[in-house]
Image (cartoon, grey):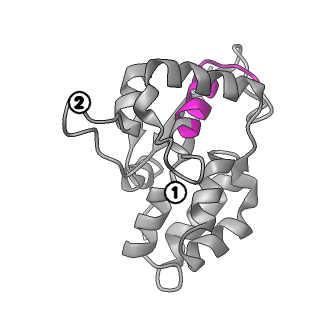
Amino acid sequence: MADQPPIYCIDSGSLFDLKQRNPPDLFPGPWAKLAELGRSRRLIAPREVRREIEAGDDEVVEWALHNANLFRDPDDAQLEIVREILREFPRFVDLGKERADADVFIVAVALLINRSQPSSIFPQVSPMFPQRCIVVSEERPRRAPTGPPKIPDVCAHYGIECIKLFTLMRNEGWTF
């Protein structure tokens, strides 16, 4: 059996960074390719990423509204993994924030898919047809060993590949 193409779970920071470097009105190509990945169910994000986007820039909000199929509501399987991650990394979430931090949900979605656990988030995942989920984030690993963990730190702990958005573009063979 040939390897399945990866699924990407994207952080809002990657979209905001893309907007800064490649505004959609000037560079529609990357945005269209991301939307295409979303339609093929290979680009996903938890609902909390949408909430972070809605608190941000208008152009990214508009893109997210047109690509609402990317965003997945949590289910019991994902919430159990969120609890597991927070037991291991209690400082991964800033409890002082008004809105739920998406980071732990991003890692949970990737871990859920990589463990081949079917859920309402990605129902076609099965142990017979494993699929790999890669996290897309512009975050860098934590700088100080005593600082709170970042997405790449937690991904590394669980063996989840974590890449930058431009790496996704290279992996997919996109050129503009």
Quadrant (top left, top right, bottom left, bottom right) of the N terminus: top right
Residue 148 visible at all: yes
In terms of secondary structure, what is the magenta stretch mainly? Answer: helix
Query: Residue at (58%, 30%) from the top-left corner?
Result: 108
In this picture, residue 154 sits left or right of residue 68:
left
The residue carrying mark 1 is 12
Q: Residue 146 carries which label?
A: 2
Looking at the rendered structure, the kind of residue marked 1 is Ser
Query: Residue at (42%, 48%) from the top-left corner?
Result: 137
Q: How crowded is mark 1: few (under 14 residues within 10 Å), some or many (20 or more)?
A: many
Mark earlier in primary sequence (1, 2): 1
In this picture, residue 54 sits left or right of residue 152:
right
C-alpha span from label 1 to label 2: 25 Å
Residue 6 visible at all: no
**Looking at the picture, does residue 56 appear above or below residue 153?**
below
Q: Residues within 10 Å of mark 2 (few under 14, many from 20)?
A: few
Residue found at the far bottom of this picture: 26
- Helix, strand or loop at label 2? It is loop
Where is residue 111 drawn, in percent x and y?
A: 56, 25
Q: What stretch is highlighted in magenta?
A: 105-118
